[in-house]
Amino acid sequence: MPFKPVRSTSAMYASPEALYRDLPRSPGAKPGLLLHQGDLLRMYAKDHADVSDLALELPTGTGKTIPALVICEWWRRQRRARVVYACPTDQLARQVAVTAGEEGIPAVVLTGPHGDWAVTDLARYDAGEAIMLTTYSTVFNSSPKLGATPALMVFDDAHNGEQYVADQYCLRVNRSGEEYADRRTYLALLDVLAPGLDALTLKRLSNRSAEPGHARTVHLVVPAQHEGMPERLADFLADLPAPWAFRYSMISRVLGSCLVYLSHTGIQIRPFIPPTSDNLLFTDAQQRLYLSATLGDAGDLERSFGRPRIKRLALPTTSPEPRSGRRFLIFPDLLPGGVTDKITQKITAMTGKALVLAPDTATAKTTAELIAPPGWPVLSKNDVKHGMQPFAALDVLGHELGDSRLMGGLPPRAEWGRLVL
């Protein structure tokens, strides 16, 4: 008697909240959904699961990752859909992967050069067997390699997404540095933009060294305001080799409406609104879900992602207070006496650890050298690209100084802490 083939079946769930109860969570997972998380999932399933562009308000500290992952898994199972979960950085994508593993949600991390991706992981995503965790830059580039078009795309930290999306639609020509740097190309481009600058500004930007007080001054040129400049700019940019050629291909269609920012260190050309409509992986998704700490109605999300309208789903009234993060901010440069760097160094020594956030690697390194006491280990972004565990694992060896000692000597070397860029 022949055996009958067994067909795989999966339970059907009316809402992501119902699915959550059956997830094979590990002992390290959260014990359950918070009240406002469950309310949000029910609101989503009832009226918003088919909205093409939807923003969920999930302030920092209220637990946004788990509800978002449950929605992703609900789409994957209930709708047999491919799902992409995009984070601003590779490090954040790997943090989400840890949470997904704890919650029993299958996920694969595909970040960095696509040639380094595991073929089996990409195949699992293509087959709808796992959620893809990736970065904004993997989605928004001249040639995305995500494979099959996803049905659901989730964008974590969407309120901070503007810089990450806009960065992919920004053509840079730096005078020097590690990336997009070529002094001759900078000066040649400066010549194309010269009609939009006064003579003194042009001279200052052309000089080999920046004048004191003007190193970080930024000037704006709007090519559309100057006759013939968009055409000359297009001719110049079209002849640039890689890597500029890739960025130019992403803005060439809207070059006439781009803005140009110039400083002594570099030139940036970018549109006010990124032309994301050219990215079919992005536009062809059935739903784009934006996770935001705050939901404003001034059009910031629409401008950041190039979408005409994004519906908002606010945090339920059952959410805990406070609804936004609290920070203790110190502004050493406002203190009299010109001791900004000394105060920053003393505060850093008191805390035992410090995280330096800067617009570029060079600035981060310079700042670290300035505020780190001698003997502190300094971790670079490469040391924590897979997560902050190497930094978190270092002991906090700061020394608590009273106010009267703030301007005094540093604590002993044995009590100094750690620094990460």
Image (cartoon, grey):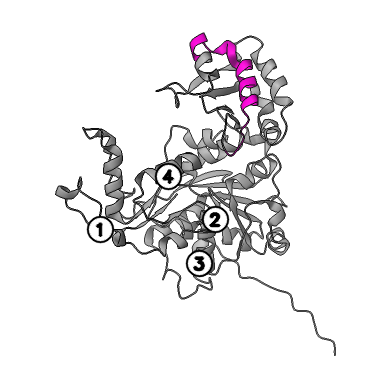
Q: What residue lies at 30% left-to-right and 44% top-to-bottom?
A: 344
Sequence-wise, the earlier of marks 4 and 2 is 2
Q: Nearer the viewer, mark 3 or mark 2?
A: 2
The residue identified by callout 1 is: 399
* Mark 3 neighbour density, 10 Å: few (under 14) some (14–19) many (20 or more): many
Sequence-wise, the earlier of marks 1 and 3 is 3
Is residue 79 highlighted in magenta? no
Q: Are marks 4 and 1 in contact (CB under 8 Å)?
A: no
Sequence-wise, the earlier of marks 3 and 2 is 3
- Distance between the alpha carbons at the discs numbered 4 and 1: 23 Å
Q: Nearer the viewer, mark 4 or mark 1?
A: 1
The residue identified by callout 4 is: 357
Sequence-wise, the earlier of marks 4 and 1 is 4
Identify the magenta region: 178-201
Q: Nearer the viewer, mark 3 or mark 4?
A: 4
The residue identified by callout 2 is: 93
Sequence-wise, the earlier of marks 1 and 2 is 2
> Of the residues shown, which amino acid type is indicated by label 4?
Leu
Sequence-wise, the earlier of marks 3 and 4 is 3
The residue identified by callout 3 is: 20
- Distance between the alpha carbons at the discs numbered 1 and 2: 34 Å
Q: Classify 162 as above or below 93.
A: above
Q: Secondary structure at mark 2?
A: helix
**Closer to the camera in the image, 242 or 130:** 242
Q: Secondary structure at mark 3?
A: helix
* Mark 1 neighbour density, 10 Å: few (under 14) some (14–19) many (20 or more): many
Q: What residue lies at 51% left-to-right and 64% top-to-bottom?
A: 98
Q: Nearer the viewer, mark 1 or mark 2?
A: 1
Q: Nearer the viewer, mark 1 or mark 3?
A: 1
